[in-house]
Image (cartoon, grey):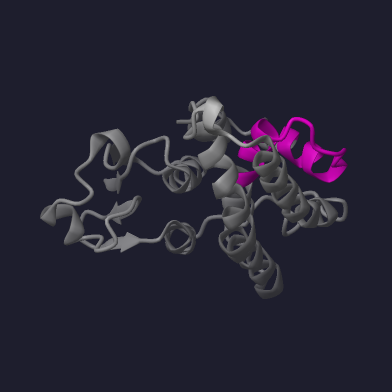
Amino acid sequence: MLKIWGRNTSSNVQKVMWAIDEMKLPVERIDVGGPFGKNKEPEYLAINPNGLVPTLEEEDGFTLWESNSILRYLATKHKSSLEPADLRVRADAQKWMDWQLAVAQPAILPVFMILLRTPPEKRDPKTVDGLKAKLTDAMKILDAQLARTEFVAGHFSYGDIPVGIVGHRFMLFVPERPKMPGIERWYNALKQRPAFVRHVADVPLT
């Protein structure tokens, strides 16, 4: 059975667990990181020298870290529809996975830190507004894509999973956002997927 090392509140663990659930693979998730610790212990660093989560461990001892790499590996190995068969569609899906890492995640992380990890009395309203504006500008790129396609690469794929995690948090963190019909329609479609609900929407932000 697959093992996933990482706490369920980690956005990167959520990516992997959502994908595994979509593929209906048996899995054991082990709490590591955050309040559970263990991620800096020698035993864990031996399988993930970054000390981050998640880490995939297979029955034969093969391990893999970096959440988007885990998504691609599992989808390819299990011949899942999460990986588009068409080369160009697959490249589009992977492009959005990279966009999540390069653009969306750097935009949302400061918003997450100031709204969830900073006491209200220590927040500067102008700073909060500025960070939300930068995040909203990034998400306008996604909204423009979703005005043209049902999902980021046409049909639902692993491209939607990393971006979907950011999209969920954006919807919660920026309720005063401008109208974004593409994202709103897509987000409502994600909420119809039981795996998204189980591993993302129903997990409290901490």
Q: Residue at x 83, y 45 (%)?
A: 182
81 horizontally vs 188: left or right = left
Q: Residue at x 53, y 55 (%)?
A: 80
Residue sticking out furthest to the left: 42
Q: Is residue 130 magenta?
A: no
27 horizontally vs 150: left or right = left
Residue 141 vs 172, above or below: the answer is below
Prevailing secondary structure of the magenta residues: helix
Q: Residue at x 79, y 32 (%)?
A: 176
Q: From this viewpoint, is residue 60 visible?
A: no
Query: For this rendering, which residue is in front, 61 or 98?
Result: 98
Q: Quadrant of residue 94?
A: bottom right
Measured as percent of width and height from the top left, residue 102 is found at 59, 65
Q: Quadrant of residue 98?
A: bottom right
Measured as percent of width and height from the top left, residue 124 is found at 62, 37
Query: For this rendering, which residue is in front, 205 or 152?
Result: 205
Q: Residue at x 18, y 53 (%)?
A: 44
31 horizontally vs 134: left or right = left
- The quadrant of the image that shows the C terminus is top left
Chain part drawn in magenta = 166-188
Q: Is residue 180 magenta?
A: yes
Residue 95 vs 169, above or below: the answer is below
Query: For this rendering, which residue is in front, 168 or 108?
Result: 108
Measured as percent of width and height from the top left, residue 196 is found at 57, 35
Measured as percent of width and height from the top left, residue 171 is found at 69, 35
Q: From this viewpoint, is residue 159 visible?
A: yes
- How many numbered marks does the figure carry? 0
